[in-house]
Amino acid sequence: APPRPPAAPAPATSSLPSSLGEFDVEQLRTFEALRGPFDRDQIRSFVGRRPWVIAGRLAKVLSVFQQTRAAWDADEATPLENRTRSAALRDAVAGLGPVSVKVGQTLSQRPDLVGEEACDALKSLQTKNRPFSNEAALRVVADEFGVAVEDVAPNLAGRPEDACLFSHFTPEPVAAASLGQVYRATTRDGVDVAVKVQRPDGLRTVAVDYACFAFAWGIIEKWWSWQRSLRGEGPFDNGDIGDVVDTVANGIFDELDYDMEAENADRFRASLDFLGFVDVPTFLPELSTNRILTTEWIPGAHLEALDPRSGALMTQLAVEACTASLVLTGYVHADPHEGNLMLRDDGKVVFLDFGLMSRVDPDIMEAFAQGIRACLAEDYEGLSKAFQDSGFLTTPLRFREDKTTPYGEAPGGLAQFAGELRDAMAATEGGTSRFGALAEVLNGILSKRWKMFTPPYVLLLIRTFLTLEGIAAQVDPDFNIYEMALPFALRRSLAPSSPEGVETLRKSLLTEDDRVRWDAILQLLGDEEPAAAAADEDAPAADVGAALTAVVGSSDGA
């Protein structure tokens, strides 16, 4: 058998090679001091000592924004089939780097914010980004493994196979993401693999963009506080926005650590092994470093290459996996866009790219589980309580009649919020079937009267489910994400792990003298007595037979 490739040597003393194609190596080398876990103070101090870098970046972003906006407006009168502004928008976002691409990927699932045309343009950022040069990519591979560029693979420079790192390496990338690009290769013992190479300027761009966001937000916060003080409204108090910026930056910094990504993948696979239909690519540590990640090549297809039936299957499996992660395991893939999902030839859904992950505490898992059940049952009191438990609503509640009045105590308490939530959901298309509709109700309607926050921990979770819902809508316009999530939500509700959840379940199912509340159990399972159903003919009747089977098994023991 051919000899196995040697174990990856330790990184060279110099963190970057002497040349990297189109990249300024000396400029990038300075920022290598920031490599590692996200350190808010270190990054702000480091970039803050280089004000010209922040000024230059802000000027470039502003210039690109103005040019793109002007091109977009100028194309408004052009017939749709002749417009070029979508391509211009996509190229502009891609040209601004990884952080901009991440924002664009998220907005591509929010037509309510940016419109259908912009969404269609931005969706291509999920699978087809602007690659960097192959010269730079091969230089990174060679430097990481301590070999000459000519010795990466024989097909690239005609070197003998036994002198090369791989037996074959595609001359062009097969995919380009925001922070890296992927090549297909074959190891010297004949294994087909995917080799992800990190963008040389990824660290610098992420650090500078974070510093720019933090700097800009600091100015905006002071301006708003000053404006509020002039109106006698007190200081600006949406302080969680700064934490949100930190949370996003922290997640993207994690994506730059390929060693961590490999560990995340193993943990994700183990956490969902009980489902039986989820897998991740096997990691090859001997051909991986902090900047190079080599995994097995997956025989399968992405959504765009699947027939409608297979596409629907992959979407269903992905939603079930992410819901189980959210309410059962607490370890969630935070970037499940189309480019990171595949249906393998054996019918399993395969998740790719584990740099961006979310961790959910048990009490929050229980709050989300209760929220899913309550939304599907149109139990708006329960849904409102779930919002408060998960931090979307303040405790105590703060309410105002309109924007001209200060926040104060809500006269009707949580019941008042639940009533307004019920009315808003009824008036919003897809209110009880689309996660995006719920986001529209909270952000576009209720937040005008109620003090609400987007907790930093939940930001990536929102991204996860908005992305999945956008994928699902392509294969099934009637897809109901809450119905798909219900079996796992019930399982969590019936097996709480936090003391608060145990006490809530106990009070729900037992009276104060420890007698079983059969009516509550039947209501939880959506199987109320006919007399109760007849008393309210308009009450929603959810078919939870499949959900109950998933939780406790079928009557025949299956």
Image (tube, rainbow, N blue to C red):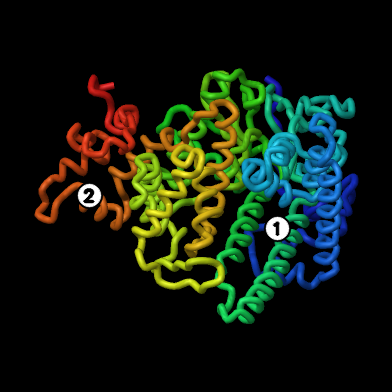
Q: Which residue is mark 2?
A: 508
Residue type pointed to by label 1: Arg
- Residue 363: % across, % down: 37, 54
Q: Report the side of 485 relative to 263 (left or right).
A: left
**Quadrant of res 183:** top right
To which quarter of the image does residue 499 belong? bottom left
In the rendered image, the quadrant that contains the C terminus is: top left
- Determine whether, in the image, residue 96 is placed left or right of residue 401: right
Q: Is residue 13 visible?
A: yes
SS label for mark 1: loop
Q: Are marks 2 and 1 in contact (CB under 8 Å)?
A: no
Mark 2 surroundings: few (<14), some (14-19) or many (≥20) residues within 10 A:
some
Q: Nearer the viewer, residue 455 or 409?
A: 409
Q: Residue at x 78, y 28 (%)?
A: 169
Q: CA distance from mark 2 to mark 1?
A: 50 Å
Residue at position x 54%, y 43% in the image: 436
Q: Position of residue 97 (x, y in %)?
A: 77, 49
Q: Residue at x 59, y 60 (%)?
A: 244
Q: Is residue 297 above or below residue 8?
A: above
* Residue 66 place in picture, x, y as percent: 84, 54
Going 50% across and 36% down the picture, which residue do you hit?
269
Task: Name the side, left or right, on which 103 lies relative to 503.
Answer: right
Q: Position of residue 279 (x, y in %)?
A: 52, 31
Q: Residues within 10 Å of mark 1 (few under 14, many from 20)?
A: some
Q: What amino acid is labelled 2 in the image?
A: Ser
Q: How many marks?
A: 2
Please name whichever residue, 248 or 24, is drawn nearer the observer in this view of the structure.
248
Q: For residue 287, say whether it is visible.
A: no
Q: Is residue 15 above or below residue 302?
A: below
Q: Which mark is residue 35?
A: 1
Q: Earlier in the sequence, mark 2 or mark 1?
A: 1
